[in-house]
DNA sequence: GCAAAAGTGTTGCTAGTACACCCATGA
DNA sequence: TCATGGGTGTACTAGCAACACTTTTGC
């Protein structure tokens, strides 16, 4: 039997880095089912907007201009116990400074029971981001100017692996995507780092 | 304004290789809009089935057990001129021998005007497949036993690039995914090739 | 002067690339 | 014997991995 009409949700998995650990932005559900559990801050598809448009607008309102991309659509018929809803999953990367409500972020490691299949969605998003971190993503995620070591930390958290500091620097500089701003860190109680930015 | 309900299509981009060129399986549309144009052989989401289930079942009916995966969901609000339909796009790889109606395959290079946004969907699928060809995909796509050079051709067509024959052999054998069947090609009017199979 | 993080080079290994000729078979 | 595609090795290059000490600053 074909479904003539189905509800379509758009669910952003909003990642951020806090204290060098990967966190995700979640809301507490205020109604049944799953009342009281954490959930992704999703919504329904909007008239005259692509899913992309909707996510872009919502992220812009809440966090400003951030990186995001579609990664998978979840269609398990039982994913919502009430009726059929499919969910188009997006990944977003939001710098911690752009998140006003700091209580809404949760360490990805520690997540337990979430509403619906949202844990599964986050896991899949986690896998996805581990694979390919695009320069475009980093351009929006990193501050305007940053030390190389900060960039290394970001790679390490997102990919969940360690890099050798010398090798990382050599590689990232050889990519020719960074530019030395000739500025230095200030007022740090250790040797100040050179600040870099993404070129063009 | 939120959409409460939307139509959800599942559209498989069924690739095959014919005469060493990439082809895609398309049907001629029998009704308006776009009557007479070629379209992907899609359908609507089915009750109690995930999109994956539906595609799997349909491919199984028509072509047998073939490789497929979800790759992108298309949600442009104007993609169907009549009403809102989103489409969950899948890629499938079907060996030419498993396609009964040979008239339904069309060289990807030569596609012109298709129904809806199906050309865009095929282009995106083309990009996707160019990137990562998994061993799992090849296991189902290749015959049980095949010469190395046939495998090279498949890589070349899917990735749209050429390999050096010696380097390709060295690399593919070093991956340890193939096994020498100790059998040879028969009745070919040139030096018969060793036949390989995927191991395990 | 101590704590903290920044910064720096060399060597070995591995994987990738470029390249040209002989071999086995059927017709 | 010819046409056809199968099969093979070496040398160079580039990228990746391992590894430990000195530098600059604030306190």
Image (tube, coloured by chain):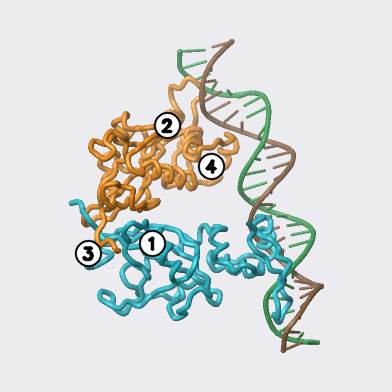
Chain colours: A cyan, B orange, C green, D brown
**Quarter containing the C terminus of chain A:** bottom right
Q: Secondary structure at mark 4?
A: helix
Taking the image as shown, residue A56 lies to the left or right of residue D15, namely: left
Q: Nearer the viewer, residue A98 or D22?
A: A98
Label 2, on which residue?
B110
Category of crowding for the residue at label 3, using alpha-carbon neighbours closer than 10 angstroms: few (below 14), some (14–19), many (at least 20): few
- Marks 2 and 3: which is nearer the front? 2
Q: Please name the residue shown 36% across and 59% down the image.
A: A88
Chain of the residue where label 4 is placed in the rendered structure: B
Q: Quadrant of residue B3?
A: bottom left
Chain of the residue where label 3 is placed in the rendered structure: A
Label 4, on which residue?
B172
- Marks 1 and 3: which is nearer the front? 1
Q: Which mark is residue A83?
A: 3
- Residue B10: x percent and y percent? 30, 49
Q: CA distance from mark 2 to mark 3?
A: 43 Å
Category of crowding for the residue at label 2, using alpha-carbon neighbours closer than 10 angstroms: few (below 14), some (14–19), many (at least 20): few
Q: Quadrant of residue C21?
A: top right
Q: Earlier in the sequence, mark 2 or mark 4?
A: 2
Q: Secondary structure at mark 2?
A: helix
């Amino acid at each position: 039997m074909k479904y003539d009409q189905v509800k379509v949700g758009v669910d952003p998995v909003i990642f951020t880095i806090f204290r060098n650990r990967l966190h995700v932005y979640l809301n507490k559900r205020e109604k049944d089912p799953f009342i009281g559990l954490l959930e992704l801050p999703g919504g329904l598809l909007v008239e005259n907007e692509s899913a992309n448009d909707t996510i872009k607008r919502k992220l812009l309102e809440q966090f400003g201009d951030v990186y995001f991309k579609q990664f998978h659509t979840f269609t398990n018929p039982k994913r919502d116990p009430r009726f059929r809803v499919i969910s188009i999953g997006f990944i977003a990367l939001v710098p911690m400074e752009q998140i006003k409500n700091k209580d809404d972020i949760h360490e990805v490691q520690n997540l337990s029971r979430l509403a619906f299949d949202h844990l599964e969605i986050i896991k899949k998003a986690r896998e996805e981001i581990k694979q390919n971190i695009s320069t475009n993503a980093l351009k929006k995620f990193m501050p305007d100017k940053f030390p190389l070591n900060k960039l290394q930390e970001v790679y390490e958290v997102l990919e969940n692996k360690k890099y050798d500091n010398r090798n990382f620097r050599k590689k990232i500089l050889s990519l020719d995507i960074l530019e030395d701003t000739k500025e230095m860190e200030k007022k740090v109680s250790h040797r100040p780092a050179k600040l870099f930015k993404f070129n063009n």
